[in-house]
């Protein structure tokens, strides 16, 4: 049964993953602002290309994810973990707007009480208002009590079960090896309501807030070391959550995202977008077919427009710097002293796909020159806590990735 469930999840994800696709500032040092992205890009060119040469694209990049997906199926994790259930009952819960509100961490953390999260892969639920919402939880086996662990939220695309996301990206399999706790939340009907929190639709912001608050009291997690990744609509959900819950997420890697919320006025989260130059679902320059979300239709915003708006909201008044990365694509980076790191990689020969994952031709080409899973973990290493930002003495986005690839 587990094998059949995993196969169904992979087929469903292949068909649907892209269907609905994430005080006064001090005056910036002009020399630093311009120099950092350029020099950083030169560093990352050599190191990412070196990584590409030593990593065999023929290797199975999602082996860890396949194993995790199979373990999840054996643990009884459903393909649709949020099926409507009785009000407050044992079902997945409708997740509709039922008076739920954003929850902030309360009560003592597991670091204080000595509580630990269960090692391995488990299916968990959290109550949001009158609904129970589900998520997949992966915890490293060697987690000593009292040792704070970093946490990654991994958001699936529209119509994609969390098990398929893991089989596709292999993120949890790799991240748990490096000591991260990984959570794959499940949207209601495997969709995200990132555009709104009202109108009788699921309040997914409240879901994320409740999930973080719940895990904090059940295990020893590092409050300032929460990260997020997302694919397609999951990328938009990650960005929406960071905007609505300021200070809770330190860094985001968004893959094939579409939008930044209009009300994301003062973001403080570091943001790196990986986006295919040939994305047929969310084109780099915006547009494409409108896609349905629980709160209405969404049309992809141009990548540089929405990230520029995000960077300006964060207080960066510098113009972006573009740098060609041979064999990879073009890096666009905004760098201002003491401001969040914001950038985007326009991936050559990339579609609405996760670089170096299994090929899904209906979503466009898949880049094989680097792994989005590896780069995500490197970006989190380079931005380890909330408030880790660019300054005259700290590296820019690309240089951070380059140093991490080099083992620095």
Image (cartoon, grey):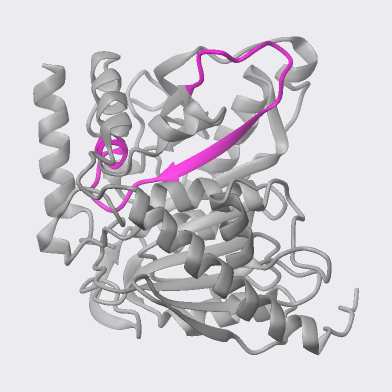
- The percent position of residue 129, horizontal first and vertical second, equals 52, 35
Of 177 and 16, the residue lying toward us: 177
- The percent position of residue 102, horizontal first and vertical second, equals 62, 45
- The percent position of residue 59, horizontal first and vertical second, equals 23, 41
Of 213 and 75, the residue lying toward us: 75
Residue appearing at x 48%, y 28% in the figure: 176
Figure check: 344 above or below 149: below
Q: Is residue 386 left or right of residue 190?
A: right
Q: Is residue 84 left or right of residue 315?
A: left
Of 143 and 63, the residue lying toward us: 63
Write the start and end of the magenta stretch as one range.
Answer: 139-167
Residue appearing at x 47%, y 53% in the figure: 375
Residue appearing at x 26%, y 43% in the figure: 168
Q: Quadrant of residue 165?
A: top left
Using the rendered image of the protein, determine whether residue 192 is visible from the camera's viewpoint: no
Figure check: 272 above or below 111: below
**Image quadrant where one finds the N terminus:** top left
Using the rendered image of the protein, determine whether residue 246 is visible from the camera's viewpoint: yes
Q: Quadrant of residue 78?
A: top left
- The percent position of residue 192, horizontal first and vertical second, equals 37, 52
- Check if residue 203 falls in the magenta segment: no
- Check if residue 162 falls in the magenta segment: yes
* Total numbered labels: 0
Of 322 and 28, the residue lying toward us: 322
Q: Quadrant of residue 271?
A: bottom right
């Amino acid at each position: 049964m587990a094998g059949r469930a995993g196969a169904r999840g992979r087929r469903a994800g292949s068909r649907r993953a892209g269907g609905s696709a994430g005080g006064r500032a001090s005056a910036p040092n002009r020399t630093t602002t311009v120099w950092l992205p350029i020099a950083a890009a030169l560093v990352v060119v050599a190191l990412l290309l070196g990584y590409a040469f030593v990593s065999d694209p023929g290797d199975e990049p999602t082996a860890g994810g396949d194993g995790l997906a199979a373990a999840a199926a054996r643990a009884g994790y459903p393909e649709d973990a949020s099926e409507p259930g009785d009000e407050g009952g044992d079902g997945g819960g409708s997740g509709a707007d039922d008076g739920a509100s954003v929850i902030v961490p309360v009560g003592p953390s597991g670091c204080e009480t000595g509580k630990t999260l269960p090692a391995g892969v488990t299916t968990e639920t959290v109550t949001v208002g009158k609904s129970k919402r589900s998520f997949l939880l992966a915890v490293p086996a060697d987690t000593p009590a009292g040792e704070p662990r970093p946490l990654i939220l991994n958001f699936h695309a529209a119509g994609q079960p969390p098990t398929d996301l893991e089989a596709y990206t292999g993120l949890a399999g790799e991240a748990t090896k490096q000591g991260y706790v990984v959570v794959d939340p499940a949207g209601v009907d495997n969709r995200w309501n990132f555009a709104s929190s009202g109108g009788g639709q699921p309040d997914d912001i409240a879901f994320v807030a409740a999930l973080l608050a719940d895990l904090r009291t059940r295990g020893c997690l590092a409050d300032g070391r929460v990260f997020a990744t997302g694919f397609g609509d999951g990328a938009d959900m990650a960005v929406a959550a960071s905007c609505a819950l300021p200070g809770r997420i330190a860094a985001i890697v968004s893959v094939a995202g579409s939008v930044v919320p209009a009300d994301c006025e003062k973001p403080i989260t570091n943001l790196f977008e990986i986006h295919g130059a040939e994305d047929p679902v969310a084109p780099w320059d915006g547009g494409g077919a409108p896609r349905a979300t629980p709160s209405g239709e969404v049309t992809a915003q141009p990548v540089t427009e929405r990230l520029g708006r995000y960077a300006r909201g964060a207080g960066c008044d510098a113009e972006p710097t573009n740098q060609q990365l041979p064999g990879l694509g073009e890096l666009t980076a905004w760098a201002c002293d003491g401001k969040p790191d914001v950038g985007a990689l326009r991936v050559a020969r990339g579609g609405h796909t996760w670089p170096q994952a299994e090929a899904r031709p209906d979503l466009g080409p898949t880049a094989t020159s680097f792994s989005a899973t590896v780069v995500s973990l490197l970006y989190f290493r380079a931005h380890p806590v909330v408030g880790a930002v660019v300054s005259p003495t700290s590296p820019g986005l690309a240089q951070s990735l380059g140093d991490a690839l080099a083992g620095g």
